[in-house]
Image: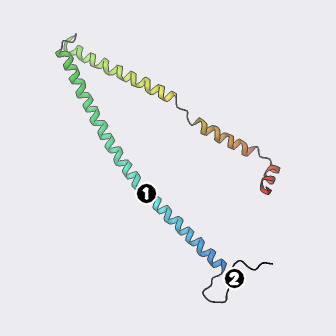
Amino acid sequence: MAGPAVSRTSSDTDQSIGDLVSVAARDISQLVRYELDLAKLELKSDVKRAGISAALLAIAVFAACLVLMLLCFAFAFGLSAIGAPGGLWGAFLWVALTCTLLILIAGLVAFLIVRRLTRMGKTRRSLADGVSMLRHVRPAAKATAKVG
């Protein structure tokens, strides 16, 4: 018969298998704690960057709205200057009609894009198939799977 895989000597520097396993388990749990701390720090940093980015994006969108308003006024006064029917109020009506037309076109495009969303259909089907396979496994098949 073969000898033990780990040969022990009687010196004081050798540790038992139980001591080694205990040290390894302690080191692994400490490593996991360090990894979790690192993940928390990275997540905190990413959340801070995302918050700053969102605030800057909000400022940019607000400025874009102001520019859009100024362009609408310039468009209306330009139409009035070239002789739009109805004078100045007619020019503003044409601007309002143009903006409404752009809103409708953007809404239609958004509606068509949303309609084409798959709502994770493949993932839901795959999960449903996996769950149904697990539910239909017989106890005898489980025992056979453990042996094989």
Q: Quadrant of the N terminus?
A: bottom right
* Residue 23 at x, y percent in the picture: 59, 75
Which label is found at residue 26? none
User: Is 8 situated left or right of 51 in this image?
Assistant: right
Q: Residue furthest left?
A: 81
Q: Residue furthest top?
A: 85
The residue that label 2 is drawn on is: 7
Where disc 1 sits, the SS reads helix
* Residue 95 at x, y percent in the picture: 27, 19
Residue 92 falls in image quadrant: top left
Residue 57 falls in image quadrant: top left
* Residue 70 at x, y percent in the picture: 22, 28
Question: Which comes sooner in the sequence, label 1 or label 2?
Answer: 2
Q: Quadrant of the C terminus?
A: bottom right
Q: Residue at x 37, y 48 (%)?
A: 51
**Mark 1 and mark 2: Cα distance apart in space:** 45 Å
Q: Residue at x 63, y 82 (%)?
A: 15
What amino acid type is highlighted by mark number 1?
Glu
Residue 80 falls in image quadrant: top left
What amino acid type is highlighted by mark number 2?
Ser
The residue that label 1 is drawn on is: 42
Where disc 2 sits, the SS reads loop
